[in-house]
Amino acid sequence: APAWRRNWPSKTFPSSARATDRPRHPENPRRPEMVQPETPAMPRMIAISSGKGGVGKSTVTANIAVAMADSGLRVGVVDADIYGPSIPRMLGIAAGKPAMSPDQKVIPAEAYGVKVMSMAMLSDDDSPAILRGPMVTKYLQMFVRQVEWGALDVLLLDFPPGTGDIQLTLAQAFPLTGAVVVSTPQDVSLKIARRGLRMMEQVKVPILGVIENMSGFTCPDCGTVTHIFHQGGGEAIAQ
C-alpha cells in the first residue's frame, strides 16, 4: 500500500466516551442503550458506464457533473476507472495528495462546484496503478465510504469500460439509483454497449438512458454536420 494509506490512522474515540456515560436501556438499567449516530442521507448514486473504452464516457461524466452543479445540485464524482483515471485532468484539478479531515476521511478535490475523488490524486502523473482485483475493490469502496463528501444530492460513478469484476462489484456493493450507458454509433461499439446494458439489468440497476457520443462532426467553416461514424445506433439500442 502507498505511504499515505499506511499512515492513515484508524478512527479513535475520546477516552471520556465510556459506557457509563451512555443512556440506559429502559428495560434493563444495567445495560447501556445503543445510540445510533446521525448520518447524512445517501445521495442518489448514478453509474456512467460503457462496454467499450474510447467512447468518451469520462468526458460525458464531467459534462453531466458540471451541468448538474450549474443547475444548483450538490454533485460529487468518483473516478472509478482505477487503471486509467482522467476526471481530474478534464476538470483542471492540479495533481497533489488529498488532505485529511479531523475524523480521518479524505477531503475530495473540487472544481466547477463538483467534488472529485480519483486514483490520479493518489499517484504520480506517469505512475501506473499495478493492483490486483481485491485491492481495486478496496480502493473503490474507500472512494465512496471514506471520503468527506458532505451533503450531496448526486454522486456520479465513472465506471471503467467493460463488464468484469470491478463493474459487478460496484453495481452490487452500492445502492445505485440508475445507470447511463455511453456508446458511439459504430456497430462494434453498440454491440459491446448492449452487453453493459444487459449486465446492469441483471443486477437490477435501472437504465436511465443511452448517450450516443461522437455521432457527428460539425464543419467549422460551413456548419455542415457530417456523421463520420453513422448515427442512430444509440437510439436503436435504447428502444
Image (spheres, helix red, strand yellow):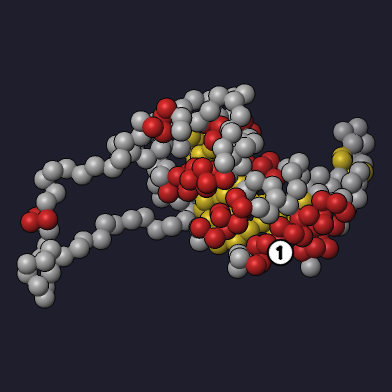
Q: Residues within 10 Å of mark 1 (few under 14, many from 20)?
A: some
Q: On the image, numbered disc 1 is attached to which residue?
A: 198
Q: Of the residues shown, which amino acid type is indicated by label 1? A: Arg
Question: Residue placed at 48% from the left, 45% from the top?
Answer: 138
Please provide percent x and percent y for residue 225: 90, 44
Q: Is mark 1 on a helix, strand or loop?
A: helix
Q: Is residue 52 left or right of residue 3?
A: right
Q: Is residue 145 visible?
A: yes
Query: In this picture, is 106 found above or below 227?
Result: above
Towards the viewer: 63 or 202: 202
Among the 4 quarters of the image, the one containing residue 180? bottom right
Please provide percent x and percent y for residue 122: 50, 31
Towards the viewer: 108 or 66: 108
Please provide percent x and percent y for residue 36: 25, 61
Question: Residue placed at 65% from the left, 67% from the top?
Answer: 202
Query: In this picture, is 224 found above or below 33?
Result: above
Towards the viewer: 235 or 183: 183
Q: In this view, does 107 lie to the left or right of 171?
A: left
Among the 4 quarters of the image, the one containing residue 98? top left
Please provide percent x and percent y for residue 129: 58, 33
